[in-house]
Image (tube, rainbow, N blue to C red):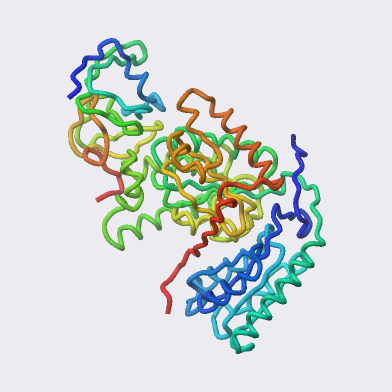
Amino acid sequence: MDDKVKDKENLCDYVIILDKRDNVGTALKDIPVGKYCLNDEGSKSVIEVRELIRAGFKVSLAELKKDEYIHKYGNVIGMAIKNINPGDKVHIENIKSLIQK
Amino acid sequence: MNNLMIKGYKRSEGVYGIRNHIIALSTVCCANSIVTQISRFDDTVIPITHQHGCDHVGIDREQVIGTLIGICNNPNVGGILLVGLGCESTGIDDIIPRINARSKIIKSIIIQEVGEKANILNLGKKYLAEIKKRLALQNLEQFAICNLVLGLECGASDPFSGITANPALGFVSDKLVELGATVILSEIPEMIGAEKLLENRIKDDMTKERLLSAINGYIQISRKYGGDLLGVNPTPGNIKSGLSTVEEKSLGCIAKAGTTKIQDFIRYGEKSKSKGLVIMDTPGNDPESITGMAAGGAHLILFTTGLGTPLGSPIMPVIKISSNSNTYKHMKDFMDIDAGQIIGGVKVSEVGDKIFNFLIDVCNGKRTASEINGSKEIAINRLAPTF
C-alpha cells in the first residue's frame, strides 16, 4: 500500500469540483493514497484518501451522513446509503439514485 | 456568419440533403434477405433492413411505418428502392403516398407479386440502375446553415462525458441555434434527475407537461418491469467507469444541449416544425434514438462517447467525439474529435470550435469515421408488443 503522505499536495490538482455546492469532486487523474489539503474558499482542511481513486471516480469532500444528498454539477445526483468520510471514494457501494428503491 | 453556406442537394424549398444516398429499404422483416441480395449489385446502394413491419397494433404500427417513411423522407436520401412482401401491415401502398415524391426517385418491388427469385433480383438491379442514372443528374447547390437539422447523442458515456465532450457539444448547440439551425436533444431516460434544469428552459406549459410525463413514463416502466435502473441506466460500462446514478449521468448528458430555450417536444421520428433546440421522445438506446432523429429529418448526428463505440447510421454522417484522450487513441479508427484535451487545459470553446469546423466540412462532403467504417446500424423504437 502506498502510504506516502502528500501533505503539501492540493486535492484540487487531482479533482474537478464542478460547482461550489458540490460535496464530491471528480478525479481527473488517479488519486494515490495519502493526505491532501483542500483549499475551499479560504478555509483549509486536510483530506485523507485511504484507497486509490481512479480517474473518473468521485471523492467525498466532506463528512456525509447516511441519507444525505450527494451534490455534483450543483445538483443532487443521489443519496448516501451509509456514512461517508472525507476522502472516501463515492460510488454505488455508498450512494444510490433517489429513484432507486 | 449567419449566412454561412453549405453544399447540398435540393429536395424542396429550404430542404437540402448533405448526401445523395440510394437506399434499398425492406418494408417488412420478411423482405430483408432479398434487400441484402439486391444491394450486392451496387456497393453505393445502402441496404436498410430491420426486424419489423407486421402484426403491429395502433400507435405502434404508426410509429414503425412513420419511421420507415421518415427514413425515406430524410433529406440525405435521393433514391429509394422499397422492397415489400405484399401482405405486411406497413405495406408499400401505405408508404409511398407519404413520401415527398417530388424530390425523390422511388421504385418498389412486391415480392409476392413478382414471384420468382431471379425476376425479383433482376428487377431490383434494373431499378437501382435507373435510380442511379437519374441521381447523377442532380447537382450540388449552396444552402444556408439555418436549414440544417442536427441530432445530439451520447453513448457509452463515462464521467468525463459530462465534463469535456458534452459541454463542448453544448457550445456547438448554442452556436447552431444562434445561426438559426434546428438541434434535437433526445434520450428521455437520460433526463431523469435533470427535470428542473430542462423545465426552466421551456416557456409553454403544455410542452413542459409533455416532457415531464415522458420522463416519468420511463421511471414507471423501470418499476413495472422489475427493479431499478442501476445496471440499465447507468449501464454496467457507465458504472465501471465511475458513473454511479442515473441522475449523475443525466446531468452530464443534458450539457450537450447548451443553454438556449427549448422550443418544442416532438414525437419519436417526428419532423420539427420549430427551429432552435427541440427535444425528441426517444429512448436512451443509441441506435433507436439515432434512427428516430434520422426519421425526423436530421442531416447528421453529433455523438459523444467516453468508452467508445463504432455506431453509425445508414443515411446520416455521425461525428464521434471522445470525452477522454485514452479512448480517442485506443479506438482511433472510430473517433473524429478528441474532447479529452479539455482535461489537459484546452478550453471548452476551443474544442467546440473544432467540432463546429469539422461539422461544416462533413456537411460539405468530408467523411466521418462512421462513414469510412461503414457503420450503418438501425433500430426502430416500439410502443407495443407484436401481435
Viewer-proximal residue among B279 and A91: A91
Indicate the position of residue B5 as horizontal and vertical percent values.
77, 42
* Residue located at (82% from left, 62% from top): B137
Total marks placed: 0
* Residue located at (35% from left, 58% from top): B220
In this picture, residue B65 sits left or right of residue B244: right
* Residue located at (65% from left, 50% from top): B149
Quadrant of image for the C terminus of chain B: bottom left
Viewer-proximal residue among B9 and B285: B9
Q: Quadrant of residue B201?
A: top right
Asked if residue B209 is positioned above or below residue B96 in the image, the reply reads above
Indicate the position of residue A50 as horizontal and vertical percent values.
19, 25
* Residue located at (64% from left, 39% from top): B358
In this picture, residue B225 sits left or right of residue B382: left
Viewer-proximal residue among B177 and B137: B137
Indicate the position of residue B129 as horizontal and vertical percent values.
73, 71
Indicate the position of residue A68 as horizontal and vertical percent values.
25, 34
Viewer-proximal residue among B327 and B52: B327
Asked if residue A1 is positioned above or below residue B359 in the image, the reply reads above
